[in-house]
Image: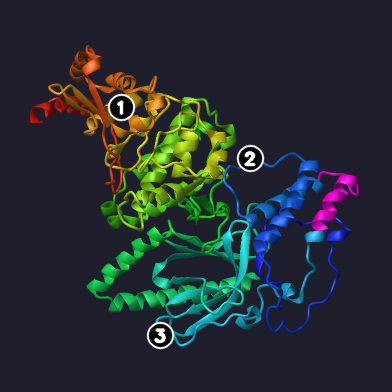
Amino acid sequence: MKGTVKTGVSITKTTGKALIAPVTRKSNKPPKAEPKKKKEDSSIEVSKKLRKLEKIEAKTMRPPTFIAGELCAPEQSCRAASRVLSRMSNLQFMSPAWQKCNDVLSAEVEYTAEQDRWFLEGSAVHLGVTPIKGDIARGELQEESLVARCLWESHWREEWCGMYESCVSFYAPMASSPCLEIAYIDITNVRPLENDDESPLPGLPKMVLETAWLCHYIAFRDDEARDTFGEKLEFAIENHVKLVEETASLEQSELRKARFWQGFQTLSESSLSSGTGKWAKISSKDKSMERAVLNGRRMAFDCDTTLFDNLSTAYKFVENLLTRALSFSLEHLEQEPESFVEFLDLTSQLRFLPLDEVDFSSRHAFCLFVNIYHCLLQQALLLSVNGPLHKKSVGHFMKTSCYEIGGDVFSLAELQCCVIRGKMSKPTAPKPPYIEAPKKSNAHRYYALDYTDARVHFVLNTGDIACPVSVPVLTPRLVEQQLNNACAVFLANKQLVIDTRRRTVTLPKVCEVFKHDFGAGDSLSILKFCIGGMDEETANTVRMLLMDESTLIIKFHHTQDQYHASLKFRLPNESIDMGRTSLRDMLIQERLL
């Protein structure tokens, strides 16, 4: 049946007679329409197939590579089938183990239908598509073609593609409205994608339609179809852009700029698959939320897979990536949007970071994940669709803003709670901005770091104004000094208030939420720990107050409901100076009370 194509591994040989469909001839006329089939719940059907494949895997081969993020059911079944096929290629032909694998796969393989023989041939009628007609905004239909559009790396869907005067539209089978529409003014590049060993759908020529925020991949039946479509598309884009530029007013230019940034922000709320992606939804408090993978501008097969020769290269790459991320602001991006596009392409490389080689007990791993966390936080803040964060939106923001890293997926909440703080104490009554990862994300604790120093809470930025707006780029060589500086800067950010007359000290809220990481977990232990982040004058004042602990009152700040619009890069000398001068000035506040 014409529809979704799954590509797990490239199969050039049949694995046995049971998998060979009967040889039939292709008719001279294309089928009139898609065949009618009984509607079934695809997720249930896929789950049944997956369970069969998993049983075979458990009996005949090693367990699959660990992935903490939950894949959607179609992707799980595709990967399981690929692993079974790979296993069969290493088994003796017709052996009992081979037969078991072959029987299960054979039961799930459908015979080729007439529609399959006409894959990527025909017209809208043959896909059951009814394109919208008479739309003035789109203009007249200039060209049409059947293409396979990439939903994610291993899944491509046959769709009808219509080239209009102002845009290109894609329709899924049996659809009466487009599932994707790309305006010509948004297309920045049209280029062919060469086939190589990593290319999916081997043998089919492919084309890339680039927008600033996302690359769209489509495959054609042959080179002639791709080249003809590409030439006409480039001609249509050139004519439309020329017309727009000739008639555009100042107001329309501003609207185009707004549309440009709306496209960037759309990247954080939607995907190529229109709500269905490679990763399963996140469940939290009986609500299902789609993951927003923010480093997906390019698909993995369109990236440089040889960038990380070793871990040292990966660590340095992430340090440079965060440095570049912290150089952006909303004003800067409006002036130089091309630099942000380059940054998006660089984040796509994180998919190839060799997580299986990382020593999670090392300071290198700590620096790596904290830097990635802050890079993702900065990008998510810049692309925040709903404007500045607030206490009602920060939970969704932290749980859905994600990066794909080393073949797995991590949200801000998962990086913070399961990885960086994974082996530290549980928070006490956390409220926004302190967001816990969903229970189903506990598998991410597989990556939990052994670095359990309480200073971690002062270096991790949660985006609220209780945290400094500046963020350090951690390096293994200087991490101890950087953590000390982070404590000083955090306390200097109006988070330490001393009133000697009333014998009262007010500490940061984060210390109360994660109190069990500070010694015995009581208020005195927390205050004594914080002395290490104070300048000498302030520390001496606190020590004097501690001489009579029975009359000392220790309080904690309330949580903040205001958030930074973006973060900034923290210079090493800036952090030290800020810590020394600001903390000393804190004592002045007691005279104002």
Residue 500, position in %: x, y?
A: 15, 21
Q: Earlier in the sequence, mark 3 or mark 1?
A: 3
| Closer to the eye: label 2 or 3 | 2
Q: Secondary structure at mark 2?
A: loop
Does 408 appear above or below 510?
Answer: below
Given the current orientation, which residue lies at the most extreme top position?
A: 547
Q: Are marks 3 and 1 in contact (CB under 8 Å)?
A: no
The residue tagged with tag 1: helix, strand or loop? helix
Assign a secondary structure to mark 3.
Answer: loop
Q: Is residue 136 above or below residue 55?
A: below
Q: Residue at x 81, y 44 (%)?
A: 90
Residue 348: x, y in percent?
49, 49
Label 3 and label 1: CA atoms lie apart by 60 Å
Residue 491 in picture, x, y percent from top left: 26, 29
Which numbered dot is residue 136? 3
Left or right relative to 243: residue 4: right
Taking the spot 85% from the left edge, 71% from the top edge, the residue there is 23
Residue 93 lies in the magenta stretch: yes
Q: Are marks 2 and 1 in contact (CB under 8 Å)?
A: no
For residue 66, the mark is 2
Which segment did they paint magenta?
90-106
Mark 3 or 1, closer to the camera: 1
Q: Mark 3: which amino acid?
A: Ile
Disc 1: which residue: 487
Asked whether residue 398 appears in the rendered view, the answer is yes
Principal SS element in the magenta part? helix
**Label 3: how many Cα within 10 Å (few below 14, some 14–19, many 20+):** few
